[in-house]
Image: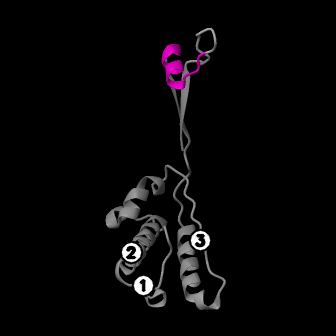
Amino acid sequence: LAGSERLDRSNAEGQHAKETMAINKSLSSLADVFTAIGQKQSHVPFRHSKLTYLLQPSLSGDGKTLMVVNISPTEASVQESLCSLRFASKVNKCELGKAKRTVEEVKTTKSAASSKRGNVNSSGKSNSTGNIRNVKR
């Protein structure tokens, strides 16, 4: 996802201008979600944009979330850099909850596991143990 962009500075027109506005709207909705989470509000506005709707499982406490903020060192970009840093500060104040690790072990027959993995030795016997682990984070 691209960062916030000032339309007047980028001189974007047509389709590029529409994309820029949509990105900025999504980032604004994301900021609203982080504000609601940070203030522990009962309603979190995940449905205000496609971005926040898709990120809902990651932002609901069942996963780890990492945000990277890229700022420009140029003097001409000071306002955009400050805006990005304010956004990052707002996000940093939110506590999403402790990440959970779930490990599910699925028992299978040796023949089913070997056919899924294709692990058959030269004698035609399976090399698998018959257990498949699914790790969810």
For discs 2 and 3, the disc positioned in front in the rendered view: 2
Give left or right: position of 62 versus 47: right
**SS class, disc 2:** helix
From what the image shows, is residue 117 above or below residue 96?
Answer: above
Whole-number angstrom distance, CA of label 2 to CA of label 3: 20 Å
From what the image shows, is residue 54 above or below residue 109?
Answer: below
Q: Residues within 10 Å of mark 3 (few under 14, many from 20)?
A: few
Mark 3 and mark 1 lie on one chain; the one further toward the N terminus is 1
Q: Which residue is under mark 2? A: 19
**SS class, disc 1:** loop
Contact? badges 2 and 3 (CB < 8 Å): no
Q: Is residue 121 visible?
A: yes
**Residue type for callout 1:** Ala
Contact? badges 2 and 1 (CB < 8 Å): yes
Q: Residues within 10 Å of mark 2 (few under 14, many from 20)?
A: few
**Residue type for callout 2:** Glu
For discs 3 and 1, the disc positioned in front in the rendered view: 1
**SS class, disc 3:** loop
Q: Which mark is residue 12?
A: 1
Q: Where does the image place residue 114, in percent across and percent down from the top left?
A: 54, 19
Bounds of the magenta segment: 110-120
Q: Quadrant of the C terminus?
A: top right
Characterize the magenta stretch by its predominant secondary structure.
helix
Q: Is residue 109 visible?
A: no
